[in-house]
Amino acid sequence: MRNLLAITDFSVKEIDELISVALDIEKHPKKYQEKCKHKKLATLFFEPSTRTRLSFESAMLSLGGSVLGFSDANSSSSSKGESLSDTIRVVSCYSDIIAMRHPKEGAPLVASKVSSVPIINAGDGGHNHPTQTLTDLLTIKKEKGRLDNFTIGFCGDLKFGRTVHSLIQALSRYTGIKIVLISPEELKLPDYVKKDVLEKNNMEYVETESLEKAMPELDILYMTRVQQERFFNEQDYLRLRDSYILDVEKLKNAKKDLNILHPLPRVNEISVEVDQDSRACYFKQVENGRLIRMALILKMLEDK
């Protein structure tokens, strides 16, 4: 039985296969509409989510399966003090596969040790978000036609951004990738990610506080929001939240074939006027997320 706790749980070959299946689903949706008939996905979201939870639910329903679960920890028995392990043991009796989001790093690992069905990590604190990474990889593949030899800039909250950490980890296994880290000093990429991922894999990277200076060399720009829920100090959040706002003016020096990605939700870090730019890919990512999660659910149920 397979679990997906971090993107490194799958090999590059397996990721490429998932992308191929997702592309086939996009071309031939009817072929897949009953692949998960009589199968049940449990979505256990101990932390708020719109896109990820609905994406999983839409994916399972598109495969002919059904969905159960909760979108608020306060509506589950955890609000009464039930342990995570007990919750997982119970829910795995009702379902064939579980997608879970939790505010505590490592919670999906705890769940995987007691579950009798596959666990998919749908985000754990500031740690990992592997299905968003699969979504990002599918989007890059569709837009660039490749997953190697490009320069990608990560902009905004690189300290707490689990989507950034997961995608950097994934890209470390491909060749010819240069990473530009764009953030204020307080939100720089953690040293352990630089040491254990970038430097360990001899990846070329630079750090800068200027989005404008970095823009001309970027093939891909990955924007992130400054996450209020990750801050211990509200004053720090208020001071930094508007550090980087992407607008039409900042795109004047960008490449014509730049791709702008964002895991969403957006607050104000991308101006709505950018939505009309052909280089904006963040709403394409949403649809790609459903496709790749369909492919993932199929693979994990087959492996089970």
Image (tube, helix red, strand yellow):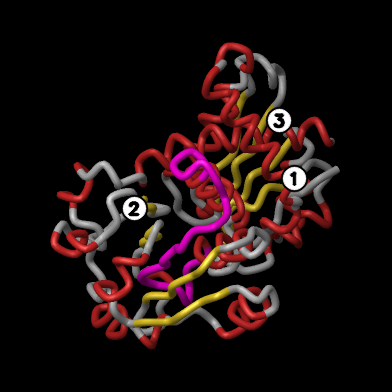
Secondary structure type for disc 3? helix
Task: Specify the label residue 35 is tagged with.
Answer: none
Judge left or right: residue 58 versus residue 4. Answer: left
The residue located at (50%, 56%) in the rendering is 47
Image position of 112 with respect to 39: above or below = below
Contact between marks 3 and 2 (CB within 8 A): the answer is no
Task: Specify the label residue 13 is tagged with.
Answer: 1
State the residue in front, 269 or 209.
209
Give the amino acid type for the residue marked by disc 3 in the picture. Leu
Q: Quadrant of residue 66?
A: top right
The residue located at (52%, 24%) in the rendering is 26
Q: Is residue 208 visible?
A: yes
Q: Is residue 94 visible?
A: no
Q: Quadrant of residue 126?
A: bottom right
User: Pointer 2: what residue?
Assistant: 258
Give the amino acid type for the residue marked by disc 2 in the picture. Leu
User: Pointer 3: what residue?
Assistant: 298
The magenta segment: 141-162
State the residue in front, 26 or 100.
26
Secondary structure type for disc 1? helix
State the residue in front, 300 or 75.
300
Image position of 68 with respect to 134: above or below = above
